[in-house]
Image: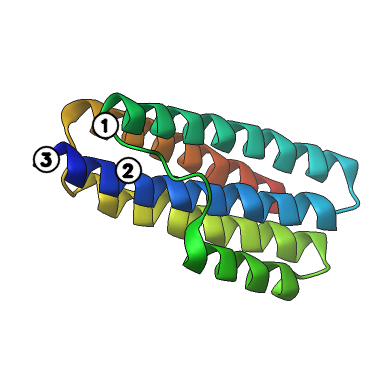
Amino acid sequence: MTNETIIEELNTLLRGTYMGIRSLEHYIQAVENDELKNNFQSMQQDIKLNAQKIAERIQNLGGVPADDEGVSGSMHSFMHKIMLPNDSRKIIEDALKGVDNYGVQYSEELVKGDLDPTSKQIVEEVIDNNRRHVEHLRHLLH
């Protein structure tokens, strides 16, 4: 495995992380409940820290980190904002689905790929953080 391959994998994860940050921004703008807004803001801060860790690892490997979600991510973000539900419960369900599908399951697929031990550890920390967000969102639904 080469640094180039690792950088490519990490940049894929980083672009997905930026999509998560953008999705949370949509939720923050859409909800009126201050407690729920605070929950989303806290999650967004965690995810921004994840993005920072991934970007630093890419730099340490000699690469240039992505600085946004990419073209396909940008189109996804636009559609997400248009399709966003109005109801707080549905917003939480949408967030839960997104974090679980992309932040956990898709990211787990990346870990199975070509990563060195240090990069793999960072990605696993990011996934564990996303799992905590999934559990928190599930708790908010009950």
Residue 60 picture location, percent across and down: 30, 24
Disc 3 target residue: 2
Disc 1 target residue: 119
State the image quarter where residue 114 is shown. top left
- Residue at image x 91%, y 52%? 32
Instruction: Kindly report the distance in space between the C-alpha atoms of the residues bearing marks 1 and 3.
Output: 12 Å
Q: Is tag 3's residue or tag 2's residue first in the polypeptide sequence?
A: 3
Residue 124 picture location, percent across and down: 33, 35
Q: Nearer the viewer, mark 1 or mark 3?
A: 3
Which residue type does callout 3 highlight? Thr
Residue 104: give its label: none
Tag 3–tag 2 contact (CB < 8 Å): no
Residue 10: give its label: 2
Q: Crowding near pointer 2: few (<14 within 10 Å), some, many (20+)?
A: many
Dot 2: element: helix
99 to the left or right of 21: left
Q: Is tag 2's residue or tag 1's residue first in the polypeptide sequence?
A: 2
Dot 1: element: helix
Q: Crowding near pointer 3: few (<14 within 10 Å), some, many (20+)?
A: few
